[in-house]
Each structure stands twice: as structure tokens, then as C-alpha cells.
Image (tube, rainbow, N blue to C red):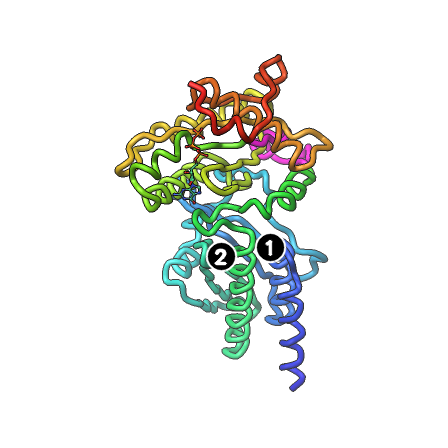
């Protein structure tokens, strides 16, 4: 009975978190004492050109006061590869719990795959093999954790593309832009850039005619593929949204205006070069702005949106920065009605 009550208390703790970071941290905090483990880590596999990388979502070791995680600004290429540890890679591939017991130590691996296809792995290192009952309890906790992650995803993600939705924009904007910059003593590549955030509004050109000519199903497929191109163009810690319709938003970190312009230009080109099935060529217009110190999400959005208007007015399939285009005296349109006007 006492054990049941303990488990209920642990479950209550686990499901108290309201965002992913706090849920990740609570999971390892609950599992470490439960398993009497040396350490518990929650990993996530991130795809990187065919070589999946390992992101530490939360790690807790005996004696540590609070869980740690990979710094969000670490470039993907600096993270360890999933294949560096064949046991881990195998647990993920088979999607099965594994216990590996050696002399004086053991590992427990519990893989999880969420509905949005995020691949997570709980790894505990122990002094000896865990009892079967403990493994079952961990598996049960893992399933409950997975259900809550799915719930969280369904409230903050767009159902068609899996990108963040407009509802989550304010929260994620403040969380990202108020995050501490990379420390000065972070190693080389990791320190490479902790410049400001840049917000881009990405609007598909003439999307209405795609729907009209090919139907909504093909239109939806185009949106899905554009979401995929967005993901592959930006870094793992950049925030990508679908704001509804054919409008996407990217919140990315870049050292300076030149690097930001290059990143958004790369996105424009990647979309232009992609052979969309049936439809062929699709282009996007992109407007962006730097996120200023006291910006609200709507301040930054409004500036980027004005820059998109210019990109559309200048013929579409273009990238315009608010600071360079709008501030140097371009017309300052009120968005809305004008966006529907054909300007070429
Ligand atoms: N297939 C599909 N279409 C959508 C969705 N949401 C909005 N749309 C369509 O997106 C189209 C947007 O059209 P407009 O706002 O006129 O813009 P546009 O044709 O892209 O023209 P410009 O932005 O000026 O280049 C409308 O036809 C909407 O019905 C969706 O989820 N799926």
C-alpha cells in the first residue's frame, strides 16, 4: 500500500508540469530515487542529414541538485551521434525496453515515440540490474509521460504540419527571447553566435490559385512540404510556426543582419528549388525583423508583416528586412485589405 501511495505521489508530480522543459526535469527527478539509479537521462534523437544526434532533454545524477539539459544554442553537429552507442541506437530501432547488466553496473533503456514522431529515450545507469517490477513501473511512468507530451503537443501544435501554432506564439516568443545567452566560456562553435533573435513571416505566393487549380488536398500537401523545408532549413532550437492558412513564422537566432538575411534567403531558395508533386514550382515571400529588447510578440510580428507586404509588392519570391527596406522610407502600408490586392 505504501508503495502504491508513493507511486501515486510520483505520478502527481510528473503530471504537474505545464511545459515540456519542466515535465522533462520532473521525469528524471522522479525516476532517479525510484530506481536508486546513479543517473537518469532523457534523450531526444534529432535528425541531422541521415545521422541522428543526441540532445539531452534532462539529466540527473546522484548528488546533483537540479537536472541539466543540453544548451539550446549548441549546434547539431556538436552533439553526439546516436550511432556512437549501438545499444541505444538498437533500443530505439526495436522500440523496446532493454536491460543490460554487467559486473557492478546495469543500464535500463526505455524508448518512447510520441504522436508527432519525436523519439525520446529514458536511460538509467544503476549499480545492479533493476527488479522486473521496477522496470514495469518505469515503463508505466514513461507511457503516462508520453500521453502528457502528446496532450501538450496537441494544444500547442498545428494539426496539419506539426509546427507550433499561433496560440503558442506569445509564450514561446518570451521564453526564447528572454533566455540567457551562451556563456562567454562556452567552447568554440557553441559560442559562435548568441546574437539577437530575428522574426520572419513567410507567406506562400498565389496559394489561392494552387487550391483553385489542384484542390485543397494538394494545397494541404504543399503546406506540409513547406513545413518540412522550414524544418530542414533552420536549426533545432529555432521556433517554427504555422499561423494558419499559408502563413508561416520563424523565430531564429543569428549573429547579425547579414547572417539573418542569408538564412531567410536560403529558405526562399530551398522552396523555389523544391519540385512540388503535381504543382511544380512554388515560391514564398519573406519579411523579417530583428527582435528588439522590449518587443512584445505582436510588435515584432507587425514589423515582419510589413516587410512581407513589400516583398509581395515588389513581385513576390523575395526576402525583405524591415530595418533595411521599410525604415529607409518605403511606403508604410496598413496590412489587411492591401494584402489581397494584386500588385504586379
Ligand atoms: N489547402 C489549404 N488552403 C488553405 C488553408 N488555409 C487557407 N487556405 C487558402 O489559402 C488561400 C490564401 O489566399 P490569399 O490570401 O488570397 O493569398 P495568395 O493566393 O497566396 O496570394 P498572395 O499571398 O498575395 O501571393 C485561400 O484560398 C485559402 O482558402 C489550408 O489549411 N489548406
Name the residue carrying label 1: 20
Q: Is residue 187 magenta?
A: yes
- Mark 1 and ligand 1: say if the CB distance to the nearest ligand atom is below 8 Å: no
Looking at the image, is mark 1 or mark 2 nearer the viewer? 1
Q: Quadrant of residue 269?
A: top left
Taking the spot 46% from the left edge, 17% from the top edge, the residue there is 314
Q: Is residue 2 magenta?
A: no
Circle 2 packing at 10 Å, graded few (<14), some (14-19), many (20+), is many
Query: Judging from the image, what secondary structure is the residue with disc 1 in?
Result: helix
Residue 191 makes an appearance in the image: no
Q: Is 153 displayed left or right of 17 in the figure?
A: left
Distance from label 1 to label 2 (Cα)?
13 Å
Give the residues drawn in magenta, as a range.
181-200
Position of residue 154 measured from the top left corner of the image (x, y, whole percent): 52, 56
User: From the viewer's perspective, is residue 135 above or below residue 48?
Assistant: below
Q: Quadrant of ligand 1?
A: top left
Image quarter hosting the N terminus = bottom right
Taking the spot 58% from the left edge, 35% from the top edge, the residue there is 190
Query: Judging from the image, what secondary structure is the residue with disc 2 in?
Result: strand
Residue 170 makes an appearance in the image: yes
Name the residue carrying label 2: 120
Image quarter hosting the C terminus = top left
Amino acid at each position: 500500500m505504501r508503495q502504491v501511495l508513493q507511486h501515486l505521489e510520483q505520478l502527481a508530480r510528473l503530471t504537474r508540469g505545464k511545459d515540456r522543459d519542466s515535465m522533462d526535469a520532473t521525469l528524471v527527478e522522479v525516476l532517479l530515487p525510484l530506481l536508486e539509479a546513479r543517473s537518469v537521462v532523457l534523450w531526444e534523437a534529432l535528425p541531422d542529414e541521415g545521422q541522428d544526434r543526441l540532445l539531452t532533454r534532462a539529466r540527473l545524477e546522484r548528488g546533483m541538485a537540479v537536472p541539466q539539459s543540453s544548451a539550446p544554442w549548441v549546434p547539431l553537429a556538436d552533439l553526439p551521434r546516436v550511432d556512437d552507442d549501438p545499444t541505444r541506437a538498437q533500443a530505439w530501432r526495436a522500440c523496446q525496453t532493454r536491460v543490460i547488466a554487467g559486473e557492478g553496473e546495469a543500464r535500463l533503456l526505455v524508448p518512447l515515440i510520441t504522436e508527432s514522431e519525436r523519439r525520446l529515450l529514458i536511460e538509467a545507469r544503476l549499480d545492479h540490474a533493476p527488479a522486473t517490477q521496477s522496470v514495469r513501473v518505469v515503463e508505466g511512468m514513461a507511457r503516462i509521460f508520453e500521453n502528457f507530451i502528446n496532450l501538450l503537443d496537441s494544444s500547442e501544435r498545428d494539426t496539419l504540419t506539426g509546427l507550433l501554432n499561433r496560440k503558442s506564439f506569445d509564450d514561446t516568443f518570451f521564453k526564447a527571447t528572454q533566455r540567457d545567452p551562451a556563456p562567454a566560456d562556452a567552447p568554440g562553435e557553441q559560442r559562435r553566435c548568441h546574437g539577437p533573435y530575428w522574426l520572419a513571416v513567410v507567406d506562400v505566393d498565389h496559394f489561392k490559385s494552387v487550391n483553385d487549380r489542384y484542390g485543397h488536398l494538394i494545397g494541404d500537401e504543399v503546406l506540409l512540404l513547406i513545413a518540412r523545408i522550414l524544418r530542414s532549413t533552420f536549426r533545432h532550437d529555432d521556433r517554427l510556426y504555422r499561423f494558419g492558412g499559408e502563413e508561416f513564422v520563424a523565430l531564429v537566432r543569428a549573429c547579425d543582419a547579414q547572417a539573418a538575411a542569408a538564412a531567410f534567403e536560403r529558405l526562399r531558395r530551398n522552396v523555389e528549388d523544391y519540385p512540388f508533386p503535381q504543382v511544380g514550382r512554388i515560391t514564398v515571400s519573406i519579411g523579417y525583423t530583428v527582435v528588439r529588447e522590449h518587443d512584445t510578440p505582436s510588435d515584432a510580428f507587425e514589423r515582419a508583416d510589413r516587410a512581407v507586404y513589400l516583398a509581395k509588392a515588389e513581385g513576390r519570391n523575395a526576402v525583405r528586412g524591415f530595418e533595411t527596406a521599410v525604415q529607409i522610407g518605403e511606403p508604410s502600408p496598413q496590412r489587411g485589405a492591401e494584402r489581397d490586392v494584386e500588385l504586379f
